[in-house]
Amino acid sequence: MTRPYTRTAGLVGLVLAVLAAGRLLTMPEPAAPPPAAVAETSVTDLWPAATVVRSAGRLADGRAYTPWYHLDGNVSVGTALTGDGSAMRLVVRSGAGSAATERELMRLPSAGNPQFNGFATAGDDLVFMVSASGDAANSASMLYRAKWSTGAASVLARDTGQVVFFNSQYDVVVADGRAYWAAAGEGGQFTEVRSVPLTGGRVTAQRVDGMYALSGWPWLTSAGGSQGGPVELRNLATGERRSVGGQPNELVNCGPAWCRVMILGASGQPARTDVMRPDGSDRKRVAAGTISSAVLDVALLDRFEVLSQTSANGTGALKLMLFDVPSGRSTVLAAGVATVQARGAIVWWSTGEQEAVEWFTLDLRTLT
């Protein structure tokens, strides 16, 4: 699994007891009670209807399973080797525990180390990119399409260009009956927004000067964010352009509704994380210290920041948290987390190692 994640989240800790210093005559002061731990707020404390779905890290045949995309809290699309290890399978898994079902969409020789990226859906249509050289950033990718509930995968487009993957929910976007993706132009001086009908056909490309990534359709955003200089949001449908400035010590990443501002300390490491509107209004502090953003996309559902906290020395498992932007409240999702992913309304994470790996999934749409 690709893991280019930094982390952020709410403040937890210990309330320290105050120790008495005086003496009463010659009698010793009674011992102070030990420090009392502050109870952490869980997701169900704030949203009783929230349901975290738990599933095994292995398929029924014993092979390790890695989910790359979720259609909802109970249905995922992921990869697993075949029993003899000769091929990598793309599998739809539904349900959990003994009620789980598995259906194969495709398989490719594992010797090519196939990489799967850019999953997106529209109804029963699932599209995704596959590169089979083991280096998705530098090899040609093909776009596939499948009816995720019933059908096998087939090639939708071969002429994809130099596709750029950011590990974002917008790496491939489905809108108006077409699949869209961004490809780097020659020399990195421009971006090609390519698309193809979901029913198949010719790939078309729209050239945009500069380096951009897809965002909430029909918006583009400056690729990779910006430190000091402005981030630009660009609407492909209307031509509208918005410039979002940042201070020299700020790293800004924007979508059409919210921007994330990472304030860097003297050592160049993140010291604080804020969110704000693209026009600079409604700025709020989200996290600081060892807490930072866990996923690239800003404010899932235009509301939730997924955060994680590392240990003081930056090693060990993560504490996963969720920040509700409108209310300013934070809640703990899990501790001892190994990997974190999010796409659209779904956040999922793993705990454990080797045979003990388990996956957990939360549909943010249930947080009402």
Image (cartoon, rainbow, N blue to C red):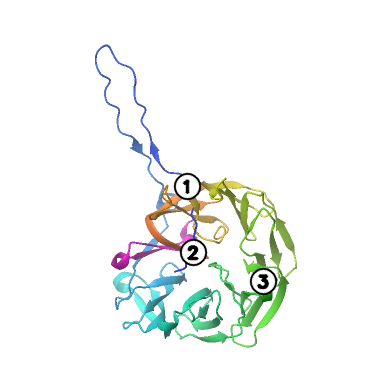
Residue position for label 3: 188
Residue at the outermost top position: 25
Depth order, front residue of 213/271 = 271
Instruction: Measure the C-alpha gap from mark 2 to mark 3.
Output: 28 Å
Residues packed near mark 1 inside 10 Å, few (<14), some (14 to 19) or many (20 plus): many
Say which element carries label 1. Answer: loop
Across and down, in percent, residue 337 comes to 39, 58
Q: Position of residue 355 (x, y in %)?
A: 29, 68
Residue 360 falls within the magenta-colored stretch: yes
The percent coordinates of residue 137 (x first, y second) are: 55, 74
Local SS, label 3: helix
Relative image position of residue 224 (x, y in whole percent): 61, 63
Q: Could you give the CA–CA distance between mark 3 and mark 1, rounded to whole angstroms?
A: 38 Å
First in sequence: mark 2 vs mark 3: 3
SS under mark 2 = strand
Question: Label 1 belongs to which residue?
Answer: 10
Residue for point 51% across, 76% down: 135
Q: Eyeballing the image, is 326 above or below 237?
A: above
Residue type at the position of mark 3 = Gly
Can you tell which of label 3 and label 1 is closer to the viewer? 3
**Residue under numbered circle 2:** 342
Is the N terminus in the top left, top right, bottom left or bottom right quadrant? Answer: bottom left
The CA span between labels 2 and 1 is 19 Å
